[in-house]
Image (cartoon, rainbow, N blue to C red):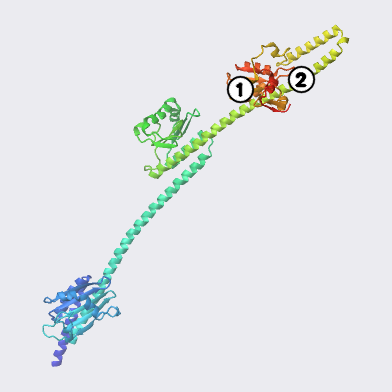
Amino acid sequence: MHDSADKNDDLARAHFQSRTLYELLCELDRADDASELARIFLPFAMGSLGVVSGFVVLRGIEENACGVEFRGLQGDDARLREGCLELLDKIFPPGEAKKVEDILPVVLHGPHLAREFLLPPGTCLLMGIVVARDIRAVVGFGPRLTSDHYGDEELWLLQSMARHFALALRRGHDARRIRALNENLSRQNVELEKSLAAMETARNMADHQAFLLGSLFQAAKDMSACLDAESLGAAFLLHAMGAESAPGGFVAVFDEHAGSEHLTTRGLSPSDAEFLSSPEGRKLLLGLFVAQKDRLPRHMESQAVENPALLEGLPGPPAQVLLFALDAECRGVMALLPRLSPGTPGEGDRNLLSSMTATFLSALGRTRAHEDLARLNRDLEAANAELRATIEELRSARVEIGLLAEARDRILNLARRGISRAGRIAPADFMLIFLVSISLAVLFNVSNPGGIPLAPRPLLEPAPNSIAALEAAALVASGEAVLLDARPPEFFNEQRISGALNAPAGLFDFVYAMRLADVDPDAPIIIYGRTVSMLYDAEVALKLGDLGHHAVYVLKGDFEDWHAAGLAVEGQP
């Protein structure tokens, strides 16, 4: 009978212990915060064992912080709070490693605990719990209501409850770490998404910039190959329309320097293109510069027309209009119709159009210089053709002069022989020779428009003004007068007056055109050079007078008086 009662008591205690553990486990499952778990565990354990006081000290190793929960302490909590860290270090020395897997609490009990000054008075039982690598806990209980002694069953129940408490602490710790990891992962995901979005934006911007740079490079390449303003305007308009996705537009260039106007249109109706080519269209385009007088583009720059009212009347109407200026004499207008793609042009698109316009202006300046050079080459070719014709005429004249000189020498020889035979020639023979000579001279003059005068012109014209050697030297030395040597080049090369310019009578027209055409008609010109039979100086003086020169002088005494006066000469006689 007695054994049966003991057995029933054992079953009742086992049932109580199991139910107590179950209820504690259910309560602990409701929380994961360490302080909240301690507030649940401490009164549950004290109530189950009839303990009058108890405390829980928790320490997070990473935070180096201590938390204290207590029940039934009468003013001794201050000492516990102040010495909690020291108490934990004493039970869990910092250098001593504990196995986290061994979660079974270490239990200390006995009267020796009363001598520990760090513990509240009356502490009868102490448990140390290794919750995790970074969490330690110390649980202490005071005396029981019925007895100061803790039996094996009470110790087992406390250890079991402490183990469930430790598992709940570990679960809560893991849950907090998981939440922290999740929150950190969420933040990283948000940052990653932002980074990916920024990368995508940067990639799109880089692609767009690459497209803009490629468009600018291709435009510069195509425009650099243009050698005339019309093809250049067409290339510029085509690339501008492609860059801005415009279905049409026009470029008008007004060049006062070259006296030309160039209009290029694309995507406009024939009537709109005809209007832009008309005087009314030209007046409307140039009127934009007047309306923009406060914001006119400077040389090699462009300026956008931002006032929509100024665009009224233009074909389209255009969505973008740029005024540009190469210099003070060359300016123009570029206009584009509204974009085919949706949206407004961005900063990069506007910069591209501005850069493309600057490239067009640079190419336009080069094209204009090329056209000026081509025009100069054409003028030079025409001048060279005239010069070649003049040289050919001079060559023909020289041949004719040679023939005349040869004829003169023959006539002189005939005359000399005739004089030597004069005594033997009858008057009839002399008359016959004279008549034949006159007939030959008339026939030559009729066949040659240049002709040969029957008498030298200097013999028929009044003698030109003369000037003394010393006076002529003073004028030449002061730079006021030009000194000419009218003799043939062979005489000039032998000996000449210093500073004289050789202007032979036979080559006078050529030398005058090359060397004397720019001489002031009122400037003094002094001429020397004659022989016994040829008055070269008088002949050149008459030709200068025919060309409008008023101060023409012949050197008195010719070369001989100059040399006799001791003035400078060059060469050897």
- Residue situated in front as seen by the camera: 434 or 254: 434
Q: Secondary structure at mark 1?
A: helix
Number of the label disc, if any, that sits on residue 474? 1
Picture coordinates of residue 501, whole percent (x, y): 65, 25
Most extreme residue toward the top is 427
Q: Quadrant of residue 487?
A: top right
State how far apart marks 1 and 2 are (Cα).
37 Å
Picture coordinates of residue 152, whole percent (x, y): 19, 87
Kind of residue at disc 1: Ala
Task: Say which residue appears at 50% left-offset and 38% top-offset.
Answer: 363
Picture coordinates of residue 539, whole percent (x, y): 68, 17
Task: Say if residue 312 shows up in the picture.
Answer: no
Please tell me how crowded label 1 is: few (under 14), some (14-19), or many (20+) other residues with Cα within 10 Å: few
- Residue situated in front as seen by the camera: 24 or 482: 482
Task: Say if residue 179 shows up in the picture.
Answer: yes
- Residue situated in front as seen by the camera: 339 or 505: 505
- Residue situated in front as seen by the camera: 16 or 231: 231
